[in-house]
Image (spheres, grey):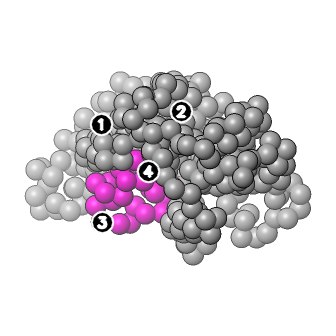
Amino acid sequence: MAKGLLMTYVLWAIGGPAGLHHLYLGRDSHALLWMLTLGGGGLGWLWEFWKLPSFVAQANRAQGQRQSSGGGIPPLSPIRFAAQIIVGIYFGLVALISLSFMASFYIVGLPLAVGLGVLLVAAVGNQTSDFKNTLGVAFLTSPVFYGRPIAILPISLAASIAAQKHRRYKASVGSETLGVRLYRLGLAYLAFTGPIAYSALCNTAATLNYVAEILGSFLSWFNFFPLLGHLMESVLLLPYRVWKLLVVDLGFSSGHFQEWEKLYEFVHSFQDEKRQLAYQVLGLLEGATNEEVHQRYRELVKIWHPDHNRQQTEEAQRHFLEIQAAYEVLSQPRKPRGF
């Protein structure tokens, strides 16, 4: 049955962020992507208003005969490549928040989550990519940045490059019933939202602190690029702003959801609090020069080096690690307060 443009626009209007129009057109990967990102933060949903006629035409052509995987290589799309990187980072952050307690998380869980995010974008529309090569690159990149949240960025970039290199058209497949498609989408949605929902509802305070720690650590890598840092901060806080607009400003706030409102302030105050603690660890006044920080660091390292304190090894090791962490924080330039 041919797909109608009017019906597509109606579904786009009433359930666009949930991907209803993509489900109607048989674009299941696109529907799942919109379900997990609320229509690309709302921006992707608005942008595709002008793309719906081409989506409908593509869906109607696919009903006759889907393009074979041997029909050439799809053109390179910078927008798809950028979306793969962003969604890969998004999937990685969600995995860090909800699954980092797992053993070997940085070897298995993180690259798998980032790779699946990249592959989801690669499978939007009539294109796809090689599953094994994309995940293989993600798993090979992960050990290089083992144990560091910033690993999300290079893993996503490497996996996106691999996905673009191995891009191809989807092979022709037989039609499936709506029930089978909904069942598959439901399982994928629960696999993504289940762990994060459990963490948010059953361990709210710890999850808040961990989210702030991860976002603060991630954003600190953009200190040298203030404009890019502000952009990333806006993207990461977009879900909060959407929730505040839809829930709080309309009077539907509750005590439980108010706890999540603290996350906004945590992200903004995280860097300042971290620097203040670093000054306390080194015994310096706030605003000390780089030379004073470096000199104090060298003095404390000599005092608390474990080799010089064999009778109190554990205490020396603890102080030594605190000193190194404090020095690393103060060695980075202060992030401008852009808001």
Residue 105 covered by magenta stretch = yes
Q: At 57% across and 61% down in the image, what residue appears?
A: 176
Q: Identity of the amino acid at label 1?
A: Tyr
- The nearer-to-camera label among 1 and 4 is 4
| Residue lying furthest bottom | 202
Q: Residues within 10 Å of mark 2 (few under 14, many from 20)?
A: some
Separation (CA) of disc 2 from disc 1: 46 Å
Which mark, residue 80? 2
- The nearer-to-camera label among 1 and 3 is 3
Identify residue for label 3: 103
Please provide the residue range marked out in magenta: 94-119
- The x and y percentages for residue 201 are 61, 72
- The x and y percentages for residue 161 are 38, 32
Horizontally, residue 226 falls left or right of residue 323, namely right
Count of numbered circles in the view: 4
* Image quadrant where residue 317 sits: bottom left
Identify residue for label 1: 297
Identify residue for label 4: 116
